[in-house]
Image (cartoon, rainbow, N blue to C red):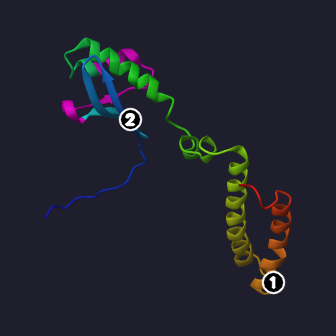
């Protein structure tokens, strides 16, 4: 058995892409970590460390060290630049219901999410701060405010 120590040192964001151009159909990954960025194309058996995503010279040099075709190198530099805008976004920016449903449906969905979080907050508040009320009475008191706020939107959101 091996003796070693393994630590998680951060999170990595990874964007998977499909590149179809000039006879190529490549699946690759661009990653952004706490300590470095990288590009990997398993079909070509390559993985290279990248500089900042907008550092075309350095990234081009890194790619050219493992890819002989200068056109593919240039194309991948452009792909890196195009994908760079997808990093450092709130997760909700990448997949958000408002992109797929009407504004009215989205408002109703947000309202339901808020109600769910409100219930969690009520439990947290009750656990954190002493109260003379029983939990059920405390919950009823707090939920009356949320029920009132829900009524202003009506029940026909969909």
Which percent across, then down, holds residue 75?
34, 17
Can residue 117 be seen at all in this image of the molecule? Answer: yes
Q: Earlier in the sequence, mark 2 or mark 1?
A: 2
Confirm whether the magenta stretch covers residue 1.
no
- Badge 2 crowding class, 10 Å Cα cut-off, few under 14, some 14 to 19, many 20 or more, is few
Pointers 2 and 1 in contact (C-beta within 8 Å): no
Q: Is residue 134 above or below residue 121?
A: below
Q: Nearer the viewer, residue 70 or 155?
A: 155
Can residue 59 be seen at all in this image of the molecule? Answer: no
Q: From the image, tell me which residue sits under label 2.
A: 36
| The C terminus: image quadrant | bottom right
Q: Nearer the viewer, residue 90 or 104?
A: 104
Q: Nearer the viewer, mark 2 or mark 1?
A: 1
Which percent across, then down, holds residue 66?
20, 23
| Residue at 69% in and 61% down | 112
Q: Is residue 140 above or below residue 42?
A: below
Classify residue 27 as left or right of residue 146: left
Which percent across, then down, holds residue 33?
41, 40
Residue 15, by quadrant, is: top left
Say which mark, if any, is on residue 121. none
| The N terminus: image quadrant | bottom left
Q: From the image, tell me which residue sits under label 1.
A: 137
SS of the residue under disc 1:
helix
Residue lying farthest to the left in this orientation = 1
Confirm whether the magenta stretch covers residue 48.
yes
| Residue at 40% in and 25% down | 80
Q: Is residue 74 above or below residue 1?
A: above
Q: Nearer the viewer, residue 158 or 123?
A: 158
State the extent of the magenta-drawn residues as a range: 42-62
- Badge 1 crowding class, 10 Å Cα cut-off, few under 14, some 14 to 19, many 20 or more, is few
């Amino acid at each position: 058995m091996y003796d070693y120590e393994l630590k998680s040192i951060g999170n990595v964001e990874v964007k998977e892409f499909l590149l179809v151009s000039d006879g190529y159909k490549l699946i690759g990954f661009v990653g952004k970590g706490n300590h470095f960025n990288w590009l990997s194309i398993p079909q070509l058996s390559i993985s290279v460390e990248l500089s900042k995503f907008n550092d075309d010279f350095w990234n081009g040099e890194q790619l050219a060290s493992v890819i002989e075709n200068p056109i593919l190198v240039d194309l991948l530099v452009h792909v890196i630049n195009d994908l760079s805008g997808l990093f450092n976004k709130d997760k909700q920016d990448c997949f958000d219901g408002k992109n797929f449903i009407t504004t009215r449906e989205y408002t109703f969905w947000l309202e339901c999410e808020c109600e769910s979080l409100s219930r969690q907050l009520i439990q947290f508040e009750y656990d954190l701060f002493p109260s003379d009320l029983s939990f059920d009475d405390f919950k009823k008191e707090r939920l009356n405010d949320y029920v009132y706020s829900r009524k202003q939107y009506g029940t026909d959101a969909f």
